[in-house]
Image: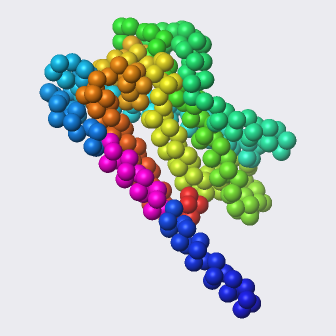
């Protein structure tokens, strides 16, 4: 026992040092990225002739540069939130079916397929969205506009295939495998004794899931959703192929409106001047800060449920 305790104590030091060093390196990398973005963005912000946070126009390559992040940040947040609202319920349902309903052989096959979908490159989703989903969405979009046009999201006089709704659907399909895979693993870790106790007391399978599995897995689902939201906000090629690339704030998700920070960077970096590149880097800094705030908010929500905090760790 003394020898075993000595080995553990001798191994704890290097492991603690390595884990602490890894955390410090990660923080240093994030700080370096932030400093780089700030340094590169400051000259362009100084040359800007308008207010960066509220201006809708994006003309950083003009003789008198005029650019702002308002419409881009709005499109980024709106499309990502719509994608999250669409993907999360479906992903949770898929995860529950794989973990608690499907037979073992079918569950293993479906789990493999979900993991495989999570590894598909985003450009593939973008090409699929342009060639198939954009023409297909004309019919459903007209239906929503005709019968639900009194709702601001589905209103407007113009309905197109390349819209905020189509881009959000592509983002939802992209992040769905990530949320489903993580949620599935969290649901599989639910305490079996609690599940068996609920069933023994006469609960149905759904009542057992509602009382035992979902409360245990809620922090993990929130973490998975925030991870999917981060990918949706930072997605570039898929949305660059679908977004109409307009600079306007509009809640009409069926019309020719919408753009995002990442898509604008992909579309404009090749032809940008020095000030234009600085403006794009400044928009990247805003996206960096938005992502940090979203993750901080997610950690705050999880930390409030202390009884499940260990499950989310």
Quarter of the image for residue 193 reads bottom right
Viewer-proximal residue among 134 and 189: 134
Residue at the extreme front of the image, as rendered: 274
Q: Quadrant of the C terminus?
A: bottom right
In the rendered structure, the answer to whether residue 155 lies left or right of residue 121 reads left
Is 221 placed above or below 9 here?
Answer: above
Is 8 placed above or below 122 here?
Answer: below
Identify the residue at horizontal 56%, vertical 58% (top origin): 312
Identify the residue at horizontal 58%, vertical 74% (top origin): 14
Residue at the extreme right of the image, as rendered: 105
In the rendered structure, the answer to whether residue 184 lies left or right of residue 311 reads right
Viewer-proximal residue among 101 and 134: 134
Viewer-proximal residue among 194 and 286: 286
Q: Can residue 219 be seen from the camera position used here?
A: yes
In the rendered structure, the answer to whether residue 8 lies left or right of residue 264 reads right
x then y, percent, for residue 272: 32, 22
x then y, percent, for residue 89: 58, 37
Write the start and end of the magenta stretch as one range.
23-37
Q: Quadrant of the N terminus?
A: bottom right
Q: Can residue 75 be seen from the camera position used here?
A: no
Is 221 placed above or below 116 here?
Answer: below
Quarter of the image for residue 28 reads bottom left
């Amino acid at each position: 026992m003394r020898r075993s305790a000595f080995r553990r104590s001798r191994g704890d030091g290097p492991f603690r040092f390595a884990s602490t060093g890894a955390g410090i390196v990660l923080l240093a990398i994030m700080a370096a990225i932030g400093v780089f973005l700030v340094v590169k963005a400051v000259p362009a912000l100084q040359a800007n002739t308008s207010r960066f946070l509220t201006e809708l126009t994006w003309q950083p390559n003009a003789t008198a540069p005029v650019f702002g992040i308002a419409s881009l940040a709005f499109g980024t947040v709106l499309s990502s939130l719509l994608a999250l609202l669409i993907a999360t319920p479906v992903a949770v349902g898929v995860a529950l079916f794989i973990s608690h309903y499907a037979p073992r052989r079918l569950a293993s096959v479906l789990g493999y397929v979900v993991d495989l979908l999570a590894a598909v490159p985003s450009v593939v989703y973008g090409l699929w969205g342009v060639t198939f989903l954009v023409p297909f969405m004309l019919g459903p979009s007209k239906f929503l506009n005709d019968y639900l046009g009194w709702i601001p999201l589905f209103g407007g006089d113009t309905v197109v295939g390349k819209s905020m709704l189509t881009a959000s659907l592509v983002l939802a399909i992209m992040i769905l495998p990530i949320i489903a895979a993580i949620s599935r693993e969290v649901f599989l870790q639910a305490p079996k004794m609690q599940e068996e106790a609920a069933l023994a007391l006469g609960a149905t399978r759904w009542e057992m899931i509602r009382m035992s599995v979902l409360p245990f897995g809620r922090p993990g689902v929130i973490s998975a959703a925030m991870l999917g939201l981060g990918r949706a906000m930072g997605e570039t090629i898929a949305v660059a192929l679908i977004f109409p690339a307009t600079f306007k704030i509009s809640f009409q998700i069926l019309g020719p409106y919408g753009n995002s920070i990442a898509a604008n960077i992909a579309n404009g970096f090749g032809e940008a001047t020095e000030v234009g590149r600085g403006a794009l880097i400044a928009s990247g800094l805003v996206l960096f800060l938005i992502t940090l705030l979203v993750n901080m908010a997610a950690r705050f929500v999880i930390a409030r449920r202390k009884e499940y905090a260990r499950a989310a760790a």
